[in-house]
Amino acid sequence: MTLRAVAIDDEPLALAVIERFAGKIPEVNLLATFQNPIEAVSYLQAEDVDLIFLDIQMPDLTGLQFIQSLSEAP
């Protein structure tokens, strides 16, 4: 089974690290990355995702606030 994943982090370097490591795991398909959690919301409403790599400390919205705002969290 392949997990459909996205990554959300305000730091581009952190996203690059996640992309690199996810690319080494055949069971993880990293579909998209986002620096802005608000942009990720519309993507998550349109796409089925099994896993979110999520930064907890972001400037405008914490990762915990973000996950609580989703009607259906992966």
Image (spheres, rainbow, N blue to C red):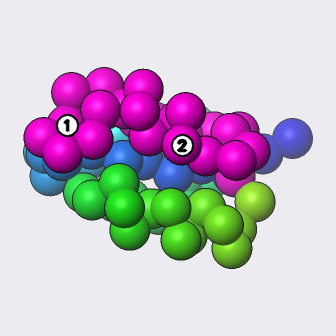
74 displayed left or right of 18: right
Residue depicted at 54% across the width and 43% down the height: 69
Q: Is 54 in the magenta? A: yes
The amino acid sitting under disc 2 is Ser
From mark 1 to mark 2, how far is it between C-alphas? Answer: 15 Å
Going from the N terminus, do you reach mark 1 or mark 2 first? 1
Which disc, if any, is residue 48? none
Residue 65, by quadrant, is: top left
Query: Which mark's residue is nearer the viewer, 1 or 2?
Result: 2
Image quarter (top left, top right, bottom left or bottom right) of the N terminus? top right
Secondary structure under badge 2?
Answer: helix
Query: Residue 53, how many percent across, how many down?
Result: 46, 36
Please give left or right for residue 14 compared with residue 2 in the image.
left
Q: Which residues are magenta?
A: 49-74
Residue 32 vs residue 37, the one in the foreground? 37
Q: Quadrant of residue 52?
A: top right
Q: Position of residue 12 (x, y in %)?
A: 14, 52
Could you classify mark 1 by the number of other residues whose Cα lies within 10 Å: few (under 14), some (14-19), or many (20 or more)?
some
According to the image, label 2 marks what residue?
69
Q: Are marks 1 and 2 in contact (CB under 8 Å)?
A: no
Residue labelled with disc 1: 58
Picture quarter containing residue 46?
Answer: bottom right
| Image location of residue 50, percent across then percent down | 72, 43
Q: Does residue 60 belong to the magenta stretch?
A: yes
Is residue 35 visible in this depiction of the protein? yes
Q: Identify the residue at horizontal 52%, vertical 36% (top origin).
A: 67
Does residue 17 show up?
Answer: no
Amino acid under disc 1: Met
Nearer-the-camera pick, 61 or 24: 61
Position of 64 with respect to 70 (left or right) is: left
Residue at 53% across, 71% down: 42
